Amino acid sequence: MRLDRFDLPLTAMDGAAATDYAAAVDLLLSGNEGADVLLDRAIAADPDLALAHAAKARLLQVAARFEEARAAAAVAARLAPTLTPRERGHIDAVALAVGGRGSEALASAKAHLGRFPRDGLVLSLAVGVYGLIAMSGRCRHHAEQLDLLAGLAPSWGAHWWLQGFHGWALIETGRLAPGIDLVERALAAAPRFAHAAHARAHGFAEAGDAAGGAAFLASWLPGYARASQLHCHLNWHMALCALEQGDAARALALHDDAIAPAVARSAPMPTLADGASLLWRCALDGADVGARWDGAADLARRAFPGPSLAFADLHAAMAEAAIGDSAAAAARAAGLERLAAAGTLAAGPVAALLARGIAAYAAARWDEAAQALAAAVPELPRIGGSHAQRAVLEDTLIRAEQRAGRTEAAAARLRARLARRPSPRDERWLAGA
């Protein structure tokens, strides 16, 4: 029997198909384009290569092509009964994730990793900004990711993929020095590992080093294909560096070139989140974003017509509120409240509070916005994402408090952030207040 890239059994009749499958998994897990071509070639050469169908399902899910993803997972599941226990467990976890059964998928993935700790594609389902753990609605999701990765690390040794995600988890839990060290080791071993580049950008952000982050991204991004998974998001990080340095014009130029829905080639949720949150931040800084909100609002209407996933819905609410569609913003908040009451929204009641705070802020109802957002901030991690992504909501609270005359509360928040890391932007806000 052949072995895959992680030294695990791979039932494959065709050697070239197995080679293409392994190379495709490398591209998929590193956040680079081209996995689709290799997987299709592997499947053409060996239609019974079940794990290639499972990898294709995961790739299609990442691209938000959900119906096709479920179809690919169904092919893998049909082939599974004759495979090894490892392959059957792998397919089960992927199929549950692709089928939208998040809590079951996470339980399946963790059980599988307990037996096969080096199954990288299954582990990739659980970790990262939009992984099963981050989107579970739990406040401790950063610590939970770190616990999982730290527990598996001895089985992986000095492998670039595990180092990159383990380093990111350390950075997100405030352990910058060891986290950055692991990420830099991952990049030394795999220089085009986009998730490690992303983790390194977080390291610069959490350290308050916008100039270093901008220089790193400017050196890393050339040559990274626009069709690759993180192209839009890495440009978003560069735009945040520009905002930190007081250059909103640069941030908006990056939006127009790589982040706006008309030009970004990432899936709808990250495209909406990156674009809407950047425009919202620019507006908080006093920049005129012009008609750019129209593209974000159009994407929100098309991709997320009704409430379903808190992280997406909050960014949709930003776009709706920013264009003055108060009815849509209110309906979204009410829908989130209904989902939370029914127990079907992982983030729970905090999502509706945030949506109402966003709508109130856009309508210049400063007291109402400050009250809603202040009540939500203690449970902010429940919406998922990273510290850098969620900071826009605390930013909005600070601006609402300043405009509502609660200047001491706003100043206290700014001072607390400045105690954690330098920030010229926070210094400007504090001085301006």
Image: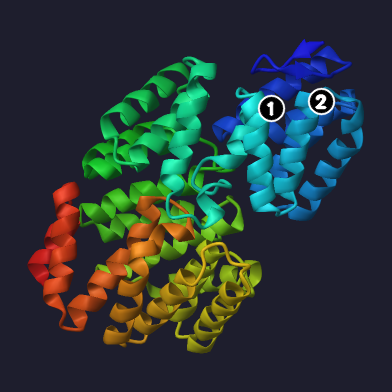
Residue at x-position 70% and y-position 17%: 8
User: Which amino acid type corresponds to the residue marked 2 in the rendered image?
Assistant: Ala
Element class at badge 1 = helix
Q: Say whether residue 1 is left or right of residue 351.
A: right
Q: Is residue 8 visible?
A: yes
Mark 1 or mark 2, which is nearer the start of the sequence?
A: 1
Where is residue 296 drawn, in percent x and y? Answer: 51, 68
Element class at badge 2 = helix
Residue at x-position 61% and y-position 69%: 343
Q: Quadrant of the N terminus?
A: top right
The image quarter containing residue 309 is: bottom right
Residue under numbered circle 1: 24
User: Which amino acid type corresponds to the residue marked 1 in the rendered image?
Assistant: Ala
Question: Which numbered marker is on residue 42?
Answer: 2
Q: Residue furthest top?
A: 1
Q: Is residue 218 visible?
A: no
Residue toward you, 15 or 248: 15
Alpha carbons under labels 2 and 1: distance apart: 9 Å
Q: Say whether residue 40 is left or right of residue 190.
A: right
Where is residue 320 drawn, in percent x and y? Answer: 49, 78
The image quarter containing residue 186 is: top left
Q: Say whether residue 333 is left or right of residue 27.
A: left
Give yes or no for contact between labels 2 and 1 (Cβ–Cβ under 8 Å): yes
Residue toward you, 50 or 80: 80
Q: Residue furthest left?
A: 431
